[in-house]
Every structure is written in C-alpha cells, then in structure tokens.
Image (cartoon, rainbow, N blue to C red):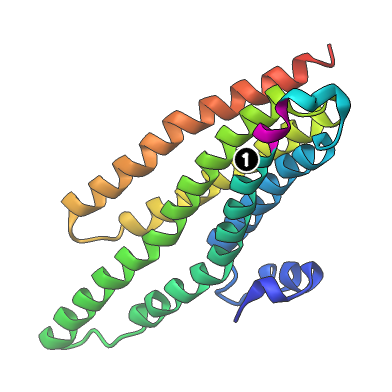
Amino acid sequence: MDFTKQSYTTFIRELASKEPVPGGGGASALVGAIGTALGNMVGSLTLGKKKYAAVQDAILELKAKADGLQKDLLAYVARDAEVFEPLAQAYGLPNETEEEKTEKSRVMEDALRNACTVPLAVMEKCGEAIRLHKEFAAKGTAIAISDVGVGVAFCKAALLGASLNVFINTKSMADRSYAESVNNQARALLDTYTSLADEIYAGVAARFN
C-alpha cells in the first residue's frame, strides 16, 4: 500500500492502530520529508525578492536538491512497509525441526538485512536535508527563518527515529560483523548530523534573543 496516497488523517489513524505498517520507519521518512519541505518553503519565499537578488541562483539550486530529497523520502514511506513485510512473515516461520530452524535463520537474516536498508537510506537523506537547512538559514529570507529551525528539528527527529529502526534490526542479526558495519554507518551519520542540526537550530533560535 502506498501510504503517501492517503490523507494525513488516515495515515495517522493507521499508524496508531495495531497493524504492523506503517510504523516508526515510515513515520520517520514522512517527518524527514516534511522537515525538508519547510526549508524548501523558505527558499520559495526568498525567490523574487530584490533584497536577496544576489542569492537567487543559489536558492534555485538548493530548492532543486530539496525537491529531490522530498521525493526520495516520500518514496521511503511506502518502501519501509514493503521491506518490513518479509521480516514479519519470517518471524512466523515454523521452528520445530533442525531443517526448519536452519531455514528460518536464513530467511530471517536476509529479511533483517533488507529491513535495514530503508531506515539507513532515510538517515542519509535526512543528513543531506540538514546540510541544506544550513544554506537556507544563511541565504533565505529572514521573515521565515523560524521555519528553518522547525525544518531542521524535524529532520533531526527523523534521523534519530530512523536510526532506532536500524539498530533494532541489527540487534537480531546472526552475522555480528555485518551488523556492526551497519551500526557503524548509522552511528557516523548520527555523530555528523545531530550536532550539525543542533548548531543550525541554535543559530536560528539566537536570532530571537
């Protein structure tokens, strides 16, 4: 099911239900898309303003990048549900005989690896979006600077949320070497972009003091 085709009220109702999808991964992707759109909006409000004539080309470039990130993150809302379904099915496989245990272990490992791909990709896209917010804060119209702060806060929340969906899957992996390599990728993204997001947010907040 493509959750991006639903109304936001339907999405939230299903998110609150006992259904396995949508879940935290898809919600993180959606929050990241919304956060990116807020920075993009600041760019839109900057275009055509004489005061910001010198940065019009830069803003257009930033907006094009933001458009792409929004599209990618929205696609991950649906994709997260798609990769979770095989994992949910794997948990229900029979586990009585040695043959069944071996097969379940194999299927589980493949499903866990696939389930990590989307939240890790969401983290990467949110990192890119956070970098864009730094530019929107520096070049965008001052009348909408608060929206840069809101947008970067959303992207940070999506980054953190997606990381938990990585870690819960790597925790169950039998191949600990592979799991740790994925964890290291996620930790590196957290280390780089949570601090940058905090820096951008603090810079925005300081304008109101």
Frontmost residue, 175 versus 59: 59
Q: Residue 176, how many percent across, how many down? A: 19, 52
Q: Main secondary structure of the magenta part?
A: helix
In percent of the image, x 18 and y 81: which residue is there?
101
Residue 53 position by quadrant: top right
Residue hosting label 1: 61
Residue 24 appears in view: no
Q: Secondary structure at mark 1?
A: helix
Residue 118 position by quadrant: bottom left
Is residue 179 positioned above or below 15 on the image?
A: above
Region in magenta: 55-59
Q: Residue 92, how many percent across, how many down? A: 36, 83
Is residue 185 positioned above or below 207 on the image?
A: below
Frontmost residue, 53 versus 161: 53
In percent of the image, x 57 and y 57: which residue is there?
73
Q: Residue 204, how many percent across, how many down? A: 74, 22
In percent of the image, x 20 and y 74: which residue is there?
105
In percent of the image, x 64 and y 58: which residue is there?
30
Residue neighbourhood size for the residue with mark 1, other residues' Cα within 10 Å, grouped as few (<14), some (14–19), many (≥20): few
Q: Residue 122, how many percent across, how many down? A: 50, 53
Q: Is residue 50 magenta?
A: no
Query: Taking 198 as reference, is 122 left or right?
Result: left
Three-letter amino acid code of the residue under disc 1: Glu
Task: Give the residue furthest to the top.
Answer: 209
